Amino acid sequence: MVISAEVPLRDIAAQFPDVVPVLERFGIDYCCGGGNTLAEACASLELNLASVLEALERHQQELGPPDNQWEQALLTEMIEYIVRKHHAFTREQIKLIDDLLTKVERRHGTDHPEIFQVSKNFAVLSSELTHHFYCEENVLFPYIAQLGAGQQPDLPPVFGSIQQPVSRMMLEHDQTGNQLRVLRGLTNNYVPPIVVCATWRALYRALEDLERDLHQHIHLENNILFPRALQKTKEAA
């Protein structure tokens, strides 16, 4: 596949995972907005399409062929990777950010009450992510893993079919994307005030690192793992 204006973002990120940093740099949503084409994304963000295509091509030439082709990987392997890399990273990052937020609130909250708004929104995000991971790791992922191993797993009766929990997880991904955008707005694109302590800078770096990883994480699930699992269910029917 060649990257072009009419290729959906999900396909670009799936086929060429090494160009994801370029999409991130331009603020292009390839996870929840993965169904949009590159041209549509550029138009909505008022980006110059030719410049974005040039940046993607240049990045590809510098890096060479992609390392990971998740469309061919075992579903169990992909699930293990997501849990080991992305779920673990998010849990560690939540602890780090909570600690940094407490310190920044205590030292600067009086003069910068906006930090309390950041803290409030992050508390909602972290609580929802914690519940989301529990549902994936204890219900949906085991089902998909058994499906990938050629077994005939059963979902809890309340779900009816795999489409229902998949749709629920994708809806929660959309909510996560919206919350990340709110946090980016509240933090001035993660740029702290000019005169600020090292702890505040570390906090904003940690939030941005979490955002970047969640984008990659959601992309893997929305655009590769879940569609493959749904297709596997159809084949087994």
Image (cartoon, grey):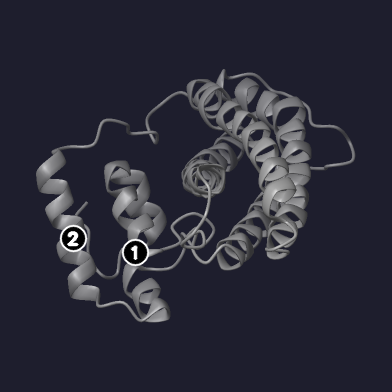
- Label 2 secondary element: helix
Mark closest to the chain's N terminus, 1 or 2: 1
- Give percent across and percent down for residue 16: 28, 45
Q: Disc 1, disc 2: CB below 8 Å?
A: yes
In this rendering, is residue 146 above or below 186?
Answer: above
- Residue, x 18% and y 60% (percent of image)? 55
Of residues 189 and 23, the one drawn nearer to the viewer in this rendering:
189
Mark 1 Cα within 10 Å, few/some/many (few <14, many 20+)? few
Mark 1 lies on residue: 26
Q: Residue at x 51, y 26 (%)?
A: 85
Query: What is the quadrant of residue 161 in the picture?
Result: top right
Quick one: 138 or 127, which is closer to the camera? 127
Residue 11 seen by the camera: yes
Percent coordinates x, y for residue 134 in the rendering: 76, 31
User: Which residue, given by chain and number where applicable, does mark 2 sit on?
Assistant: 55
Residue 120 sits in quarter = bottom right
**Relative to 161, 50 lies left or right:** left
Q: Position of residue 117 (x, y in %)?
A: 73, 62
- Inspect the image, locate mark 2, and give the three-letter code of the amino acid beneath it: Ala
- On the question of residue 165 being in view, the answer is no
**Amino acid marked by disc 1:** Phe
Please tell me whether mark 1 sits on a helix, a strand or a loop: helix
Q: Which residue is at 57% across, 37% downward?
A: 229
